[in-house]
Image (cartoon, rainbow, N blue to C red):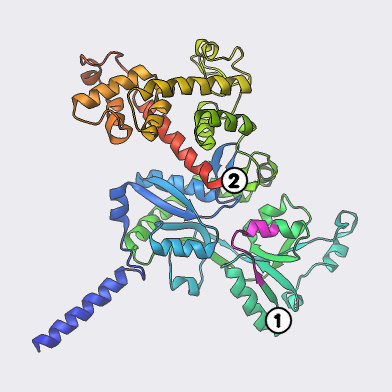
Amino acid sequence: MKRLTGIIITIAFIVFFSACTDSKGIQEDFPEIQERGKLVAITSYSPLSYFIYHGEPMGYEYELLQMLGEHLGLEVEIKLARDLEEMNHMLARGDGDLIAYGLTITAERRKELAFTEPMNVTHQVLVQRKPDDWRQMKLHEIEAMMIRDPFDLAGETVHVRKGSAYISRLNNLSLEIGEPITVVEAASEFTTEDLIHRVASDSIGLTVADENIALIQSAYYQNLDVETPLSLPQQTAWAVRPSSPMLLDTINAWLTEAQNHADYYVIYNKYYKNRQAFRSRYASDFNPSNGGGISPWDDLIKEGADTLGWDWRLLAALIYRESQFNPRAQSWAGARGLMQLMPRTAREFGASNPFDPQQSIKAGVNFLLWLDNYWAEHIEDPEERQKFVIVSYNVGQGHLQDARSLAEYYDADPNIWEDNVEQFMLKKSSPEYYNLEMVKYGYASGIEPVNYIKTINELYDHYKNFTE
């Protein structure tokens, strides 16, 4: 009897453990995420979900993730997946904590994913091209040439995104009408938006998209028709691993609260309703996710980065942080140009006109080289030295040397920025520390340089997602 009881307990434990652990054994839930201080979100490039525009990260999912991170008091890291299948694999492997993408909730997907509360309701529509001379035609003439009845898809070829819910819908539709529909899964690098572009440019004939995506895309591609529904209304949501019930409850609680406030819907309207803004973004030369550059000054930045031996995207992030790529920028203190040099510093390092982009970048790079030579005498590790160069570009090497002296005095490492010198830079705003004998330069608003390098590194990570 005791042996039977032991077997029952063992089986119960196995069942319980299995319910709390996914197929890969990933057991991280919200407490572990809180402990590491960072939420890792998996998403995909999209001119609606996540992209870079004029140097700034933007997107519906991106802005909601910032709201969620602020609500939870967590840093948010974004990882890109090529397609929906890779999103699932990354989540299962533990490469991220949630999929932040508008996934259609289906019974098949529920077998592997735990969905949040619905975030939007949409339905699938057929994306097709209007006749070439549609502007000269009357409405009823255009209508006569459009596919309006799903039965007319019999024998047609439809290209759809790999791993999307559109595949099963088209296959079911083929069974319903009793005629074959050829469904072609696009290569993994093609998003739904890419396929819409290919329909508009006559590279393929038909695709399928969620109505909200199709409608905003048709604001730019005016030769598209997106009025033929192919499904009943469907809910979309984010998803986590089934083994993360506490994270799911936490996100759902935030969603419930957020959906009671106007800001949540302002973000949706910004990306899915504002047709004019979408056209401007999509047509911009400074949208790297759409084949453009980060800024008008990319070539100059790359040249300067080569001189420095830096990744050009890091230098671009520093310049954006300084001036938002505005060559006429001028601070309240008198710093000018793309790299926000004070007039004396600009002249000293070679810029007679700091408002000239070429002169500003050249002088800024020369100043960064000078700082690198200065710190080479103190910081041997090149990666750490780069951090000290960036911080001193903002606050000056004197205040940073004070923070190093404090770190050494309090038995921290004066040659490591994060969690060492960084902490004593923050303390430079307190009289308890800036009045100590080893502090030569007095008070400094330490939070500013700490946030300065943090925002540059965050922006650098975003740029790496979209540019080589």
Placement of 337 over or under 191, stated as above or below: above
Placement of 267 over or under 426, stated as above or below: below
Indicate whether residue 193 is drawn in magenta: yes
Look at label 1 and name its amino acid.
Answer: Pro
Q: Which residue is painted at 63% across and 78% down in the image? A: 171
99 displayed left or right of 193: left
Counting residues from the start of the chain, the first of labels 2 and 1 encountered is 1
Query: Where is residue 158 shown, x and y percent of the image?
Result: 70, 70
Q: Which residue is painted at 19% across and 29% down in the image? A: 411
Q: Which mark is residue 180?
A: 1
Picture quadrant of residue 312: top right
Mark-to-mark CA distance, 2 and 1: 39 Å
Query: Where is residue 427 shown, x and y percent of the image?
Result: 27, 25
Which class describes the residues within 10 Å of circle 2: few (<14), some (14-19), or many (20+)? Answer: some
Look at label 2 and name its amino acid.
Answer: Lys
Mark whose residue sits in front, 2 or 1: 1
Q: Which residue is painted at 19% across and 24% down in the image? A: 409
Mark 2 = which residue?
Answer: 270
Q: Which range is magenta?
A: 184-196
Picture quadrant of residue 336: top right
19 displayed left or right of 175: left
Query: Where is residue 69 shown, x and y percent of the image?
Result: 40, 46
Total tally of numbered discs in the picture: 2
